[in-house]
Amino acid sequence: MSDLYWTPQQLAEEAGVSASIVRRWLRETVDRAGESGAWLIDDDLAARVRAHFAATAAARAARPTACSVDGCDRTDIKGRGFCLVHYNRWYRHGSTEKRDGSEHQRAKTHCPHGHKYTEENTIVFPSDGRRRCRACRKQIGKGRP
Ligand SMILES: [Zn+2]
Ligand SMILES: [Zn+2]
């Protein structure tokens, strides 16, 4: 066994495919026994990867390319090498990352004006259980004549 390992990225570049496709093939092909993290591909496995992607090169050439977002293999390319989903995301907020609700999460700890919902700063309306920000109320009060 050699100390030299290959990465999916290296083999992907060799085969002219995306690293996500190589990783997907590895996931489907290799039983990692619950192991996760970076792939360490030894010479044997590298040879299998090369053989597989050499054998499927012709079929790939006939198929549309997959989305350029890592891990996405949708082929409904809309623009900029992105699939429809990722293109729309990119178009909407300039990133192909899924909005994971962190803004929503922040809204739970801060009022819409960025004041923290601390115990002292929070008024909870018993009628609907929603929180109001005391700091904002004060500011509104100040603005009034
Ligand atoms: Zn995509
Ligand atoms: Zn506030």
Image (cartoon, rainbow, N blue to C red):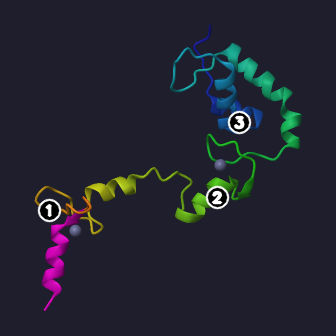
Residue at image mark 1: 121
Foreground: disc 1 or disc 3? 1
Q: Residues within 10 Å of mark 3 (few under 14, many from 20)?
A: few
Disc 2 C-beta below 8 A from ligand 1? yes
Numbered circle sitting on residue 92: none
- Would you say 94 lies left or right of 86 here? left
Q: Residue most toward the front?
A: 127
- Dot 1 lies on which element? loop
Question: Residue 1: image x %, image y %?
Answer: 62, 7
Query: In the image, what residue type sits under mark 3?
Result: Glu
Image quadrant of residue 84?
Answer: bottom right
Residue at image mark 3: 13
Q: What residue is rendered at 14% in x and 81% in y?
A: 141
Q: Residue most toward the top?
A: 1
Disc 1 C-beta below 8 A from ligand 2? yes
Q: Nearer the viewer, residue 71 or 131?
A: 131
15 shown above or below 114: above
104 shown above or below 27: below
Residue at image mark 2: 87
Q: Residue most toward the bottom?
A: 145
